[in-house]
Structure formats: C-alpha cells, structure tokens
Image (tube, helix red, strand yellow):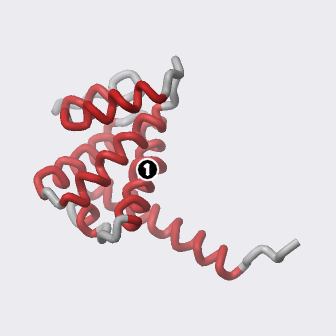
C-alpha cells in the first residue's frame, strides 16, 4: 500500500477493505452507535473485538494481517489514529485475549518493530499500574 495519511475519514474504510469479514460486526456497531460525530476510538474498539476473536481462532495468516495493519496504523495514522490504536486497539487485544485464556504471544510475536515497541510500552504501563494498586490499596472509608 502506498503511503497515505490515515485519519478518521479513511481509517475504517481501510480496515474494511483489508478485513471484509469484519463487515457484519461493523454494521452491528453502526446500528448501536447513532452519533453523527462518533469518536474514532469507538470504531477502533469495535475492530479490536473482531481482532480478539480472530486471534483466538489461531488463523496465522489473519494474525499476520492484524500485525500488518497495526504497523500501518501506527506509521501512517495521524496523531488521533495512532493514539486510539495504542490505547483502544492494543489494550483491548491484551485484555480480550487474556480473558479468553489465550496467550498474547499469538499476536505479539507477529508484530513488526513499531507495533512491538508500542505493545511493550503498554505492557510496562499495565504492570506498573497493577504494581501501584497492589502496593497502595485504598483504605476503607
């Protein structure tokens, strides 16, 4: 794919072109969110749910494509897309895969350099936050 700036106007179009099987879930998502200026993060979160299911099925070629689109969104996405991809997509992948009892390695070992770097940053953040919560529990009031 040639370089194009990915933003809220073309992000989901690119995803749907690359992952036509997401179309049914996309239509359901659109029916449930009737906002005229729906935040792109909601749309990316819907795609993350599809991605979790795909990763859990273990179809390597599809997991490879998810890793490729992750790199694309991080490299060519504007600041809004890049931030939403890091915070919504990658985080939902981590949570969704773990909740289903699978290893995130199914996905992370396929990530390309930028995607893997962002994954490691997210992983460090999650572990730091969990550590802080465990070491500083709220006192009952």
Q: In the displayed structure, does residue 15 sit left or right of residue 133?
A: left
Q: Nearer the viewer, residue 64 or 102?
A: 102
Query: Percent from the top left, x then y, of residue 112?
Result: 24, 56
Quadrant containing the C terminus in the rendered view: bottom right
Q: Which residue is mark 1?
A: 86
Quadrant containing the N terminus in the rendered view: top left
Secondary structure under the numbered disc 1 in the rendered image: helix
Question: What is the crowding at mark 1: few (fewer than 14 residues within 10 Å), some, or many (at least 20)?
Answer: many
Query: Percent from the top left, x then y, of residue 84?
Result: 46, 42
The quadrant holding residue 55 is bottom left
Residue 5 in view, yes or no:
no
- Image position of 86 with respect to 16: above or below: below
Residue at x 47% of width, y 38% of height: 41
Residue at x 34% of width, y 71% of height: 101
The quadrant holding residue 19 is top left
Q: Nearer the viewer, residue 141 or 111?
A: 141
Query: Percent from the top left, x then y, of residue 24?
Result: 27, 32
């Amino acid at each position: 794919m040639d370089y194009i700036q990915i933003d809220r106007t073309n992000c989901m179009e690119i995803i749907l072109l690359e992952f036509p099987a997401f179309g049914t879930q996309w239509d359901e998502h659109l029916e449930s969110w009737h906002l005229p200026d729906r935040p792109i993060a909601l749309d990316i979160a819907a795609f993350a749910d599809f991605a979790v299911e795909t990763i859990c099925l273990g179809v390597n070629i599809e997991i490879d494509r998810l890793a490729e689109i992750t790199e694309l969104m991080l490299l060519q996405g504007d600041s809004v897309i890049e931030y939403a991809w890091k915070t919504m997509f990658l985080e939902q992948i981590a949570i969704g895969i773990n909740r289903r009892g699978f290893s995130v390695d199914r996905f992370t070992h396929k990530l390309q350099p930028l995607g893997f770097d962002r994954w490691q940053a997210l992983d460090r953040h999650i572990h730091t936050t969990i550590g802080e919560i465990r070491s500083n529990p709220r006192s009952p009031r």
